[in-house]
Amino acid sequence: MGKTGEFGFIDKIRSAMKTKNPSVVLGIGDDAAIFKPTLGHELIFTTDMLVEDRHFDFKWISPWQLGAKTMAVNVSDCAAMGAKPTVALVSLGVPSAFPVKDLEAFYDGMKGWAESYGAQIVGGDTVGSDKFVVNVALVGEVEKGKALKRSGAQAGDALFVTGTLGDSAAGLYSLQHPSAKGQETAPLLVKRHLTPIPRFAVGRALSTKKWATSAIDISDGLSSEIHHLCEESGVGAEIHEEAIPYSASLIHFCDENQLDPLHFALDGGEDYELLFTVPLAKISDVLQKLPAETGTVVKSIGRMVPKSKGITLINRKGERVALKAKGYDHFGKDH
Amino acid sequence: MGKTGEFGFIDKIRSAMKTKNPSVVLGIGDDAAIFKPTLGHELIFTTDMLVEDRHFDFKWISPWQLGAKTMAVNVSDCAAMGAKPTVALVSLGVPSAFPVKDLEAFYDGMKGWAESYGAQIVGGDTVGSDKFVVNVALVGEVEKGKALKRSGAQAGDALFVTGTLGDSAAGLYSLQHPSAKGQETAPLLVKRHLTPIPRFAVGRALSTKKWATSAIDISDGLSSEIHHLCEESGVGAEIHEEAIPYSASLIHFCDENQLDPLHFALDGGEDYELLFTVPLAKISDVLQKLPAETGTVVKSIGRMVPKSKGITLINRKGERVALKAKGYDHFGKDH
């Protein structure tokens, strides 16, 4: 993308980013954006960087899908805190040969997804780079004291997860193994890998209703995330293999290819489901009211135990095995 | 940097980033950080991405210096808004061979500079990358309605600049031209290029005292920044070449090498001085009180004029010439 294209592009996104969100005082076009916080709220602040050929491959993902996914990943962090996203900044490292129309498609995907969750892109930075690099920084709001943290889980709490696990990793596997079977099943798995949907409504319900004692989003696989949750809360956990929810697509895809769905669920990643803990007194609310209010299926997959009991998986034979953190981790997410 | 090193590194920075700033409710270690805004304030939000071999070269800048400079560049955006920085997120793309001790030095430089301006690094993201990439996202606070914008300049306002211009670009020139003369003069210029100091105190004084009608930081050279200011304010400007402030080092370095300091001041960049406009009634305050309160020299270099008169430079011969925007621009900063 040449200079001229770039300037035309920036003018285009600038006009597309004129202030809309009422909390935005000054959008793109100054040294910084200005926004006003809502009284009685705290702010959450998160960021994610995605690098070409490390986190995505344009062979498989379109610029529009990448824009949508990048924003979804940040909104998922926001959902894991029970917060509403408000303003985002987008930094891009763009190769000189990158087509302007692809950059516009990327922004359209990003902008569309931001707005669908009530967030506004208020600026950013665009620089030259050998590989395409995108960083999103997102600020969100949550009612004072109601943010969901990783650190609140208590021994005895039930462990819940939204939706199904393993689909995204299996979708990636099918992209990486073109000869794999699964003409009918793979497309849905690939879709979950390329366009994850953050569990925004569930996060909001859990925080505002105070139904959860802790929460985390599953970006790096269940085996890694349960370790993060237990470490921050100072507890252990036991997970029942037979309770881990799989999609019909994943089960069929694994049957066709002699693969184990458990591997994708535990050690895959990018499902962006929520993993959260619920005190006994709130379990019936979570089982009945939460799905009704959010349209999202949730399932209990185990319980939190004292730290001394460690983190274990009870397999289908009823054997208790230590659960190691094997979820992939692009160098370790340090927030 | 291998996995193990990375995890040790993350543990190290995590322990170094435990909550200190009173506005920080939850620092590093969750899906997002949590902070509380100060009543009666608005928030500013800015980001900058720096890419190895595009914005910096480890031949010339140390990891510590790069960390300090990356934070300084973001604090400068904050200063240009008249705001106080509060919380920052740092995203890093790190080559696998990058030494952990260099990464720690980078963080020490970044952390030290953040804290010296009252800001706290509350998290981030660390990923693998072929080239070293760093993105900082910074949130700051400014008293409601007092943020300095690019858009407030009026025809008739005086145009001021802090410090001296062109030093950083001349320092870069001397790094790129080892055969250039200037054993005595170059080191100070190089220092200004490698470790710029944001004009934080001036920005705060201008916003809280309402002395300026507009402000912008000079990251891309005077000729570019005056165009940004005029465009956002809908006015023109005239700048007197003889009034542009140069350091003694720059003048001597240019004499020794038959270079024109004006070129570095107009079309260089990264001085991170503030360019701001002052209504006639406030000029005496800015000339007398501002230097006394901030210890920073400021100088009037021209005035704002009606848009129809354009943006011109009055050269040393008294001739009026159109001033084109030539300042370098890593693809166009879109905020």
Image (cartoon, coloured by chain):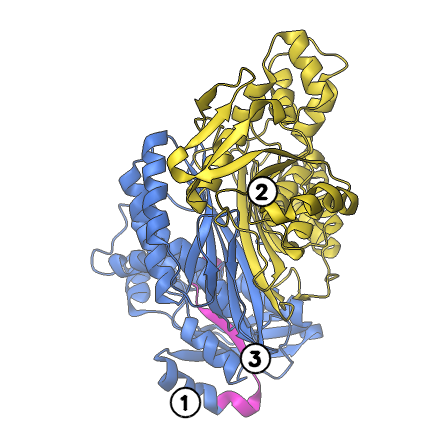
Chain colours: A blue, B yellow
Q: Chain of mark 1?
A: A
Q: Is residue B223 visible?
A: yes
Q: Is residue B58 visible?
A: no
Any mark on residue A21, and which? Answer: none
Label 3 or label 1, whichever lies nearer to me, is 1
The magenta region covers A267-283
The residue that disc 2 covers is B276
> In the rendered image, which quarter contains the N terminus of chain A?
top left
> In the rendered image, which quarter contains the C terminus of chain A?
bottom right
Residue A129, percent across and down?
45, 33
User: In front: B251, or A251?
Assistant: B251
Q: Is residue A293 left or right of residue B128?
A: left
The residue that disc 3 covers is A303
Tell me which residue sits at (44%, 58%) in the image: A73
Q: Amino acid at mark 2?
A: Phe
Queried whether the magenta region covers residue A276, the answer comes back as yes
Secondary structure beneath dot 3 equals strand
| Mark 3 to mark 1 CA distance (whole Å) | 19 Å
Label 1 or label 2, whichever lies nearer to me, is 2
Tell me which residue sits at (43%, 79%) in the image: A299
Secondary structure beneath dot 1 equals helix
Tell me which residue sits at (50%, 71%) in the image: A83
Q: Amino acid at mark 3?
A: Arg
Tell me which residue sits at (75%, 46%) in the image: B289
In the image, residue A283 above or below residue B288 = below
| Mark 1 to mark 2 CA distance (whole Å) | 59 Å
The residue that disc 1 covers is A288
Discs 3 and 1 lie in a common subunit: yes
Q: Amino acid at mark 1?
A: Gln
Secondary structure beneath dot 2 equals strand
